[in-house]
Image (tube, rainbow, N blue to C red):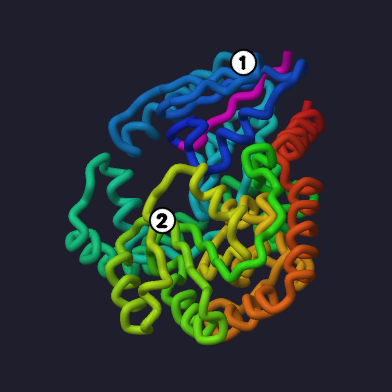
Amino acid sequence: MERVLVAPTKSKISDSEYGKNYNIINNFDSDIFKIDVLTQHVEDEPSPTNVCAHPIGGKSEITYKAKLYAHILTQLNNGSTNIYHHMEMNYGWFNPVIISGRYKDIPIVIGPCQTGHKIFEEEFNNLLSSWTGTQVNKNLSDLLYKIAIPTEKLLISPIRETLFKNTIERANKIIVVHEEAKKFYSTITDESKIEVIPLGVDINEFEYTAPKNNCNIVAIGSLRERKGYDILLDAFKQIKNQYESSVLHIFGEGPRKSELVSLSKELGIVSSVHFHGYVDQNIIRQHLSESRVFVHPSRSESFSLVRLEAMASGSPVVISNTSGAEEMVDDGKEGFVVPIESSKDIYHAVNKIFSDFSLTKQISKNARQKVEHKYRWEKIASEYMRVYNSLI
């Protein structure tokens, strides 16, 4: 069998991990390829017999990455690797092994690649904590954020961007998640090397349910500035004025929760806004199946899996026009795409759904059909296999 080395991936290989790596790897069933995955921790073993996940440990992101690249070098030097796949490629990051150019005889795949999104103070705190392996005090991280962002732009960003571009240019294949990302990466490397393969959803886990004729709204995501819940609450006040029975269910936790609760009180809608926090996925699926519409008002996204999960469940979606949104949702057919920062447009889109149940049902069916056709994990993994085949 041809051997593929996959590293780095997400730091944890887990069925409960909300993300892409496990789901792609768990569908890499093949008689042609033996897949070896290097990661920090393995919580759930991938089910295909040709896939083996190897935990290498590390107390923090720094120590993990040091051990990881030592393992990668060892594996590539022993001559048994036929394809090297850097899977977890964050926008603007780099791979020192690839940059070195020492392994020109081994085909290199990078992806899934996404365009970047804005880093707000809350994200910076999480990033800093993951790198140090300890929870950094919020006040300290906010201070460092104010210092780090201008310093990064002036001194670090030019170096990092050069390393990022060198990493991309040396790969044989770049896998990106949508056409918008392809346009960006084609400014860095030869467009002929770029393959568009989206991320996906488990259509068996998120079963289709016909939408209910009510005025319930579901929103899912961490309660932070980037997710735009203040915009949604403004829109919901307008919705509530027209549809008195309307209820908004918000699932997630985050640093902006107290501010959002206060805002809902100020707007006079607190009795109709339910902050559920983090809950079991079964509860989220139940609410998606029992609600009329899913709203995702983010200020910035690179690729949103939760939008696909709502579509798979048969919930019409109203989403902000972040990266790749118009490719995921054909406006008016599988849902509505609205301008970022526009509570007025969210209101108008939800009103279209609430005022026309026949339209609601048709959008629901269209959304599920698109997910089944384009976004099944099995189909996505087979596309990765096709890329591997093209390189051997």
Disc 1 from disc 2: Cα separation = 46 Å
Q: Would you say residue 35 sits in the magenta stretch?
A: no
Secondary element at image label 1? loop
Residue 321 position by quadrant: bottom right
The magenta segment is 1-10
Earlier residue among tags 1 and 2: 1
Rendered location of residue 138, percent (x, y)? 21, 59
Where, quadrant-wise, is the N terminus in this rendering? top right
Judged left or right of residue 392, residue 250 is: left
Residue 59 position by quadrant: top left
Up-down relation of residue 199 to residue 22 (above or below): below
Up-down relation of residue 75 to residue 338 (above or below): above
What residue appears at the point 48 percent right and 20 percent down from the top-left corner?
A: 54
Q: Would you say residue 7 sits in the magenta stretch?
A: yes
Rendered location of residue 16, percent (x, y)? 48, 35
What residue appears at the point 62 percent right and 30 percent down from the top-left corner?
A: 25
Query: In this figure, which residue is indicated by the disc labeled 1?
Result: 79
Judged left or right of residue 234, residue 124 is: left
Secondary element at image label 2? loop
What residue appears at the point 42 percent right and 75 percent down from the top-left corner?
A: 230
**Which disc number belongs to residue 252?**
2
